[in-house]
Image: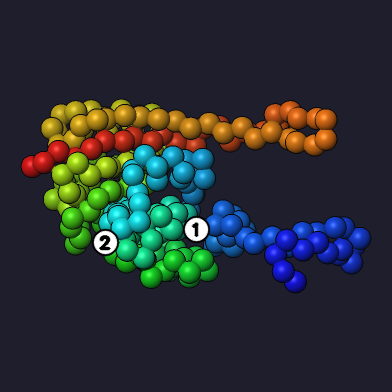
Amino acid sequence: MEYGSVIKLSTGVKAYILRPTLIDYMFKGFKRVTQVIYPKDLGFITLLADIRPGSRVLEGGVGTGFLTAVIARYVGDEGHVYAYEIDKRRIDVALENLRLVGLENRVTFRNKDVRVDVDDYDIDSAILDIPDPWNALKTLARALKPSATVISFLPSINQVEKLVNYVLDSGLFVDLRTYEILLREYEVSKDVIRPKTMMVGHTGYIVFMRMLKQ
């Protein structure tokens, strides 16, 4: 049946046939091997990083591949994602997930530690989802274009403090900012609209900075 069709299941329940979105695939189809970055943070990160068709993006810490898929969708066929991950099993899972949504050709996986060595250069934006991003910044600085955006996603304020102190002492980056995104959905029915009892509160902190010319 075509998307947009309505059918009645054998149980008597009415069902709607809708084209799956990327979020549907991520939450219903992707295999998970790690904690993931939620859509509320993914959307803000990609906008803040100024990722666009043609962007060359470096990702440090792939995990399940939620962020990888979103970046790959944004960079288009003209851009590319270079994804660094030390755990080969996670790379295999992320690649399988990307194949599910047809984005695997826009990503090159590197089974390497982004804190130690980076093979790629002229990078427009770097996004780190690792516990100690301060240890990757000097390595990244050699790969980034001047004025490149750098974003780190961190779960605890202690990590944010350590990263911020390092950045301020390094002299490598400017325009330092930190954000936290909270999301509350509403229950909607005829004549009744109210906040849902449960909301997606703290998931992590987003630390943003820009690369200086060296």
Residue that carries the numbered disc 1 in the rendered image: 33
Placement of 35 over or under 174, stated as above or below: below
* Element type at mark 2: loop
- Rounded to the nearest angstrom, the CA distance separating label 1 from label 2 is 18 Å
Q: Nearer the viewer, residue 191 or 88?
A: 191
**Residue 51 located left or right of residue 70:** left
**Residue 130 located left or right of residue 97:** left
Residue for point 49% across, 49% down:
35
Residue 53 visible, this angle: yes
Q: How far from the left and from the top, in percent, is residue 91?
A: 39, 65
Q: Residues within 10 Å of mark 2 (few under 14, many from 20)?
A: some
Q: How far from the left and from the top, in percent, is residue 79?
A: 31, 61
Q: Nearer the viewer, residue 108 or 124?
A: 124
Image quarter hosting the N terminus? bottom right
Looking at this rendering, what residue extends furthest in the right direction?
Answer: 12
Image quarter hosting the C terminus? top left
Q: Amino acid at mark 1?
A: Val
Residue for point 19% across, 62% down:
119
Residue that carries the numbered disc 2 in the rendered image: 112
Residue for point 83% across, 64% down:
7
Q: Amino acid at mark 2?
A: Lys
Q: Which of the marked residues, 1 or 2, is nearer the chain's N terminus? A: 1
